[in-house]
Image (cartoon, rainbow, N blue to C red):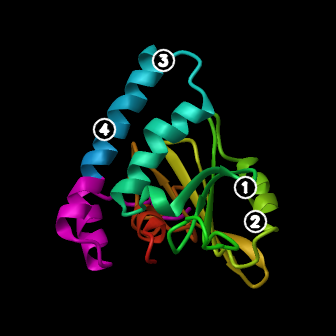
Amino acid sequence: MPNPARRVSDEQLVEGLVDNGLRPADAETVIRTIWRVRRLARWYHDHGQDISEHETRTFLIVPILQALGWSEQKMKIEWRNTDIAFFSEVYKKGKELKEPCMILESKRIWEGLGYAERQAEGYARDFPGCSRLVVSDGICYRLYRWENNKWNWKAYVNLLKLKDRHPYHTEIGGASEVFVSLMPYY
């Protein structure tokens, strides 16, 4: 039996983000955003009805991505069949960006992420320069990286229970690795 995953406090996450180049004020904004997402997720759990994938993406996922530094000008929603495509440069007229650096596949809250990986991998086939895939239901995030000619699951976080690694798969990183990898300049 592996040792249990260790809890990551909000303060430890802030310190980890700062250690990886995020300004302290921005790292604190990330934590405040996580608090709001947690609060809304609890409300959805207790009172929400028919929460769509679009609501999950809009109200739970995008605010965290923006807090981590992604601007609206570098994200495209529902671009070429992807839920969110991320670009290293501003996406604008007259400047052709050929492919995203990261793709996120969103799912309805509490729906599970098991099959979302294959869907995101399918989208990524069209973009050989894409190095990161993320699947999320707004609470849980799975991060994949392109290594050795395949997508490898690298990190996992549940916003309600931040841990230093996946609770069962000891080789899968945790909260800090997910959030650092989600930063635009990673």
Mark found first going from the N terminus, 4 or 1 = 4
Q: Which mark is residue 124?
A: 2
C-alpha gap between disc 2 and disc 4: 31 Å
Numbered range of the magenta stretch: 1-30
C-alpha gap between disc 1 and disc 3: 26 Å
Q: Which residue is mark 4?
A: 36
- Name the spot of residue 56 as percent of width and height, x first: 53, 36
- Name the spot of residue 53 as percent of width and height, x first: 61, 34
Q: Which mark is residue 117?
A: 1
Residue type, label 4: Arg
Q: Decide: few, some or many residues near mark 4? Use Cα within 10 Å; few <14, some 14-19, many ≥20.
A: some
Residue type, label 1: Glu
Residue type, label 2: Ala
Q: Secondary structure at mark 1?
A: helix
Label 2 or label 3, whichever lies nearer to me, is 2
Q: In this view of the protein, which residue sits in the foreground, 168 or 111?
A: 111
Q: Which residue is mark 3?
A: 48
